[in-house]
Structures are given as structure tokens and as C-alpha cells.
Image (cartoon, rainbow, N blue to C red):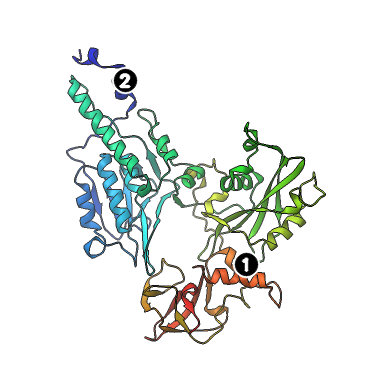
């Protein structure tokens, strides 16, 4: 008979039952780091085994960061994880190290990352220095991988134990829980998701196994089958209601709402000037006797070496919103919606390409069978409003320097750091020396008429002052490479 059982309080009994067991370190098992040429998924290092106290020291020895522990900025190492869990505090410390030093994380096909491993996985980060250090989430899984979360687990011996044993185990689990909750910003997860993790019943895990889950936790997915040729009304609705919850019919059921839901409607639009497919989702409601229609435009391209993925934006048209003096009960037509979106300048929200699949789709059902994803069609972009027009430019909009890179985009290798006010020479003043990284800016840079309007010119200027337009240039050191047009101005 367990001598402490009669003395346990109901709350302590519940804690012992509901807090999931910690993984016990095994004498023969330990976290090991492999660095060979046969690692999966482009991994720099593969970590295998249970996470135990002291494993952060091992990680630092293998991936220490640049000298002095500074972040990796020219290349991003990729740590692949294959572990059933272990010590949560150590997993959290590993995540913070990955975050500080700019190391990406990945779970490869047929590998597992559970519990404390999933916490470490959340530290996956890419860092870049473009006159300032910027960090962004860089964590991914294969469609056939298992990524699962659960709360810190309570260790209670199977045989007799004392009140002190239970209290110490409980306190350790609570300290681990507190440490995770205190670092949600560094782990880049929401309090709502953390709440779900800590509500997982004993012995179970919260798997990241659907499209919706991956979007909620900001995890990229690899190993996908080709994207579908069409987007259903259901998926148009999911994407639009994700970026604007007020488009949901249930939003109008609140007691304090002065609006009354009318109807929703989906439609397919003709392709954008860039070749992107387009659709729209409309939501109608009554307010003070007038019928309002909110329009959400969705665009998507197949992913390839160039721009790809999904973008969406929510637009309002006053003529449809009871302000024209002749409110309409019918939704606008496809032609009217196309006129609106062609003239709109509103910003887009961007999604990973796999967001085109319905949110409830299971990742294992989306796994590729080896079929290549079709390449994005070549998009004609010349003549363009975003090409260089002068024979020389100088580096601007930086404190110290801008980077010249082997390919367009901040993920490419750095060739040279070009000091502020130094001159560079465009290789060409046509589209042969131009790269545009987003579908929205391809549209903005492509004039629709021989004489672009001031609005079209303003859109193109906005893209040139972002980091979406890159020019092929030569520096005074005779290095050729790509530089963001944001950092190039008149000499």
C-alpha cells in the first residue's frame, strides 16, 4: 500500500493524474548530434535521442553561432530533430539558443519531435544583417513527420513515495511550465496555443498535423504534392475569414452588434495581369437599413524558384455600402469586383503556398508521391516601372552599408558590404537586370497602359522602396550581384 495515498489532497491527486509523465532519461540513451553528408532535408546537423540536462552544452559545441556566440547571418544552419522528448527546461534553453544564434529547425519525414523536443523546435530562427540584425521564424516539418506538444510531465515513482516526492515532482513540473509561459514571445507562439498545449490530457499529445495547425503555429510544410488547379469556395472563405474575422456570419450574432448578416458569396475572377489566379469572397450585412458588401480578393501562384504562394486582401467599395443613394440587395457581379480589385491599392496578407488546401486537410494526405510541382509561368515584366533608369546610383537608406548578394533576396550569399553613399552601376536598364520577389509588386511594376497614371507610378515607387524589387549591379570593386532597390538612390 502506498503510505502517502490517504494524505493526498484532491487537488494534488488531480495534479498527479492530469500532468503528463516526464520522459525518464535512459542510461543507454542520450541526445546525440550527427554531422554527415547523408543527413535528410538539407540539415546541417541531426539531433537524435532524449533531451537531458546538459544537452545545451552539446548544442553549443556543435552550433555555437559566429565568434562570441553572435548570430549566423550569411548562412542559416538547419538543425533537424528526432526525439521523443525529455527535460522541458533544457528544451527551452535549447530553443532560446537557436533563437539568439539564428539556427533553423526541421523535422524530416518519418522523424518525431515530441514534448521537450517540440519546445526546442520552436526556437528555429533565421537571422540576417541588413544594416541591422533582423530575426524571423524559420521552422519547418515534412508532411510525413510528427510534431507533437504536451505539458511538462510529472515523475512519480511506481512504488512507494512520500509527500515530499510528490511535491518536488509537482514543483519541477510547475517551474518548467512557468518558464515556457514566460518565453512565449521568444518561442513565437500565442497564449491561446499555449493554453491548448497545457490542456492536453495525460498520455496524449497535440499534433501539428493539419494545414490550420501549421498556420496557427507558423510552421512551414515541405514534401507537398502539387497544388490544386482551382480554389474552392470553402477555401476562399477560410482564407478571407482568417485575415478578417468580421466577415464570419457568427460575428453578427453578438448582442451588442447593430448589424444583421445577409449572405455570403464566392466567385472566380479572371487572372491578374501577372498570371496569378484570382477569386473573391463576399460577405453582406444590413446596417441602419442599408446593405453593405465586403469584398476579399485572393490571389495565388504555384511555388517555384520565383514568386509563389497565396496573397489576400479585404476591400471596401462605398458604392456597395449604402452610401450611393441606391443601395443594392444583390451582391456585385464578377465584372464589378474585377474593376474594384484592379483599381485597389490595399495591402496584401501573404500565406505559405500550402494554405490553398482546406484547413482541415491532414498533412500526411498532402504528401508528394514524387511528382514535381509545376513551375510558375514566366511573367513578362518589361517594360517596367521598377527597372533602373540611370547609369549610376548610390547606397542610401542605411546607417552603414547595404549588402550585395549572389541572388535576389536576403537569404542569398553576401558578396560584398557596400558602404553608404558608395556608387554602383546597374548592369542594364531593362528587365534583364530586374528581379521582383512578390506577385503584388509584379503587378505594380507592370504598366497597364503606355502612359502610366500617377496612381500606377505611386504603386511602383512603393515597391521600389520595399525589399521586393532587386537590381543586378556592379560595385567599384568590380563585384557583380543583386541589391535591394530600396537601398539605391540618385547619385
Query: Quadrant location of the N terminus?
Result: top left
Query: Between marks 2 and 1, how big is the CA–CA gap?
Result: 61 Å
Task: State left or right for residue 407 relative to residue 165.
Answer: right
**Is the residue marked by circle 2 packed among few (<14), some (14-19), or many (20+) residues within 10 Å?**
few
Percent across and percent down for residue 173 are: 27, 33
Residue shown at the point (79%, 45%) measured from the top left: 330
**Is the residue marked by circle 1 packed among few (<14), some (14-19), or many (20+) residues within 10 Å?**
many
- Give 436 or 26, whichever is nearer the viewer: 436
Note whether residue 373 is visible.
yes
Mark count: 2
Residue 456, quarter of the rendered image: bottom right
**Residue located farthest toward the right when viewing the structure as drawn:** 326
- Give the labeled residue for mark 2: 11
The label number, if any, that marks residue 404 in the structure image: none
Residue shown at the point (73%, 46%) measured from the top left: 292
The label number, if any, that marks residue 443 in the structure image: 1
Amino acid at each position: 500500500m502506498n503510505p502517502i495515498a490517504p494524505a493526498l489532497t484532491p487537488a494534488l491527486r488531480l495534479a498527479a493524474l492530469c500532468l503528463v509523465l516526464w520522459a525518464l532519461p535512459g542510461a543507454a540513451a542520450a541526445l546525440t548530434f550527427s554531422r554527415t553528408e547523408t543527413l535528410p532535408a538539407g540539415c546541417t546537423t541531426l539531433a537524435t535521442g532524449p533531451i537531458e540536462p546538459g544537452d545545451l552544452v552539446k548544442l553549443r559545441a556543435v552550433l555555437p553561432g559566429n565568434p562570441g556566440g553572435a548570430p549566423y547571418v550569411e548562412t542559416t544552419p538547419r538543425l533537424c530533430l528526432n526525439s521523443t522528448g525529455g527535460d522541458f527546461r533544457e528544451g527551452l534553453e535549447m530553443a532560446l539558443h537557436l533563437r539568439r544564434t539564428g539556427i533553423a529547425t526541421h523535422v524530416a519525414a518519418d522523424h518525431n519531435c515530441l514534448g521537450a523536443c517540440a519546445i526546442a523546435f520552436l526556437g528555429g530562427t533565421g537571422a540576417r544583417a541588413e544594416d541591422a540584425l533582423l530575426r524571423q521564424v524559420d521552422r519547418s516539418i515534412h508532411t510525413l513527420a510528427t510534431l507533437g506538444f504536451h505539458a511538462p510531465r510529472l515523475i512519480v515513482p511506481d512504488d512507494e513515495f512520500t509527500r515530499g516526492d510528490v511535491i518536488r515532482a509537482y514543483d519541477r513540473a510547475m517551474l518548467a511550465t512557468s518558464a515556457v509561459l514566460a518565453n512565449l514571445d521568444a518561442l513565437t507562439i500565442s497564449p491561446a496555443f499555449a493554453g491548448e498545449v497545457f490542456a492536453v490530457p495525460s498520455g496524449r499529445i497535440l499534433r501539428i498535423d493539419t494545414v490550420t495547425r501549421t498556420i496557427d503555429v507558423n510552421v512551414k510544410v515541405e514534401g507537398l504534392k502539387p497544388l490544386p488547379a482551382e480554389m474552392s469556395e470553402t477555401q476562399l472563405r477560410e482564407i478571407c475569414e482568417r485575415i478578417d474575422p468580421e466577415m464570419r456570419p457568427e460575428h453578427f450574432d453578438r448582442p451588442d452588434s447593430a448589424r444583421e448578416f445577409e449572405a455570403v458569396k464566392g466567385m472566380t475572377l479572371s487572372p491578374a495581369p501577372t498570371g496569378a489566379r484570382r477569386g473573391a469572397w463576399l460577405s453582406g450585412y444590413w446596417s441602419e437599413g442599408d446593405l453593405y458588401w465586403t469584398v476579399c480578393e485572393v490571389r495565388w501562384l504555384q511555388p517555384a524558384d520565383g514568386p509563389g504562394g497565396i496573397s489576400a486582401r479585404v476591400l471596401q467599395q462605398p458604392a456597395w455600402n449604402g452610401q450611393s443613394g441606391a443601395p443594392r440587395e444583390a451582391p456585385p457581379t464578377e465584372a464589378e469586383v474585377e474593376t474594384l480589385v484592379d483599381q485597389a491599392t490595399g495591402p496584401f496578407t501573404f500565406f505559405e503556398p500550402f494554405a490553398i488546401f482546406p484547413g482541415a486537410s491532414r498533412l500526411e494526405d498532402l504528401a508528394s508521391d514524387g511528382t514535381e510541382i509545376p513551375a510558375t509561368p514566366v511573367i513578362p515584366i518589361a517594360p517596367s516601372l521598377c527597372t533602373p533608369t540611370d547609369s549610376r546610383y548610390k547606397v542610401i537608406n542605411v546607417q552603414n552599408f547595404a549588402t550585395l548578394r549572389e541572388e535576389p533576396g536576403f537569404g542569398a550569399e553576401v558578396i560584398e558590404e557596400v558602404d553608404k553613399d558608395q556608387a554602383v552601376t546597374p548592369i542594364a536598364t531593362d528587365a534583364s537586370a530586374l528581379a521582383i520577389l512578390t506577385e503584388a509588386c509584379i503587378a505594380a511594376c507592370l504598366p497597364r497602359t503606355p502612359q502610366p497614371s500617377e496612381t500606377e507610378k505611386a504603386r511602383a515607387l512603393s515597391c521600389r522602396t520595399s525589399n521586393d524589387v532587386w537590381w543586378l549591379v556592379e560595385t567599384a570593386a568590380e563585384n557583380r550581384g543583386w541589391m535591394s532597390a530600396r537601398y539605391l538612390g540618385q547619385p
